Amino acid sequence: YVYLMLIAPILNKAIEQFSRKQLLNAVVFVSIADLILGYLMNMDNGYSFIHFIFLYIVGAYISKEPSLFDKLKRKHYLLIYIICAILWGIIAYVTSGEKVYFKTNISYNNPLIIIASIAFFNLFRKIQFSNSIINKIASLAIASYLIQDGIGRMLYPWFGKLFYNDCVLMNIATMIVGGFVWFIGCSFIEILRQYLWRGIEKIATLIPPLHQKRILENS
C-alpha cells in the first residue's frame, strides 16, 4: 500500500497524458504481466506491486471509458458475476486436494476472480446513493481490513477453534457473529484514531511554519 501511494502521482500523471489507445495498451500490458508472473507462474497470488498497478490502471480505464462499460446492462454484469463465481467455486472444490492448484485458484489474480470483480464493480457503479449514517459506517470499514491483515493474523488460530466441523449452520452463524463483532471492535479503534488525528491536526496548527520561525528569528 505504501509503494502504491508513492507511485500513484506518477501513475496519475501518466494516465492523464495517455491517449485512449495508449491507456488500452497499458491495460493489456499490465494484464499480461500480472497473468504470467502472478497467476501462471504462481509467484505472488495477487499480493504484489504489479497486481496493485494492474488494479489501479484498470480502475482508471473504467473511469475514463465509462461508455464502453455502459454497453452492458446491470443484469448482464450480474449474470457474468454469478457464472464466474460458480465456475470458481467448482474449480476450487475440485482442486482442494491439490495444494498448489488450490492456492492458485483462490489467488487474487485468478482471471475468474478479476472478471467477477470487474462485473461486480460495474453492477453498482452507476447507482446513486447517499446516506449520512451508511457513509459514516463505510468510512470506518478500512480499519477492519487493515487490522485483520496485520495484528489480526495472530488471532487466526484462536478464531479457527470456534468452528465446529460437524455443524455447517453453526459455522455460518459463528462466521456472521464473529465478523460483526470484529467490525464493531475495529470501528471503535478507527473512531479513536480519527479523534486523536483531529487533535494532532489542531496542535499542528498552533505550531508556526518553519519559514515563519526563521523570519521571526531574523527580525
Image (cartoon, rainbow, N blue to C red):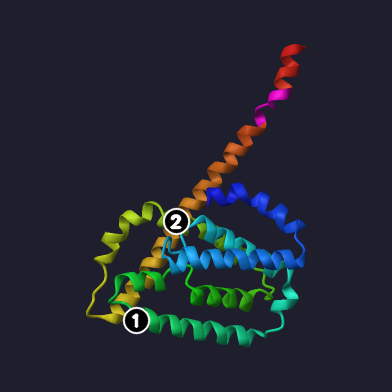
Q: Which of the numbered marks, if any, corresponds to residue 169?
A: none
Give coordinates of residue 128: x percent, y percent.
69, 73
Q: Amino acid at mark 1?
A: Tyr
Give coordinates of residue 143: x percent, y percent.
49, 55
Q: Earlier in the sequence, mark 1 or mark 2?
A: 1
Q: Is residue 66 visible?
A: yes
Give coordinates of residue 138: x percent, y percent.
56, 63
Q: Amino acid at mark 2?
A: Cys
Would you identify the image quadrant in which residue 70 lies? bottom right
Viewer-nearest residue: 116 or 91 = 91
Identify the residue at horizontal 26%, vertical 67% (top origin).
Answer: 162
Q: Secondary structure at mark 1?
A: helix
Identify the residue at horizontal 51%, vertical 68% (top origin).
Answer: 35
Mark 1 highlights which residue? 93
Q: Secondary structure at mark 2?
A: helix
Give coordinates of residue 99: x percent, y percent.
30, 71
Mark 2 highlights which residue? 186
Q: Is residue 133 visible?
A: no
Please tell me whether residue 31 belongs to the stretch shown in magenta: no
C-alpha span from label 1 to label 2 = 32 Å
The vertical placement of 195 against 123, above or below, is above
The C terminus lies in quadrant: top right
Identify the residue at horizontal 67%, vertical 49% (top origin).
Answer: 9
Q: Which residues are magenta?
A: 206-211
The vertical placement of 202 against 179, above or below, is above
Q: Nearer the viewer, mark 1 or mark 2?
A: 1
Direction from residue 169 to residue 6 in the image, left or right: right
Would you identify the image quadrant in which residue 87 lies? bottom left
Identify the residue at horizontal 71%, vertical 83% (top origin).
Answer: 71
Neighbourhood count class around disc 1 (C-alpha, 10 Å): few under 14, some 14–19, many 20 upward: few
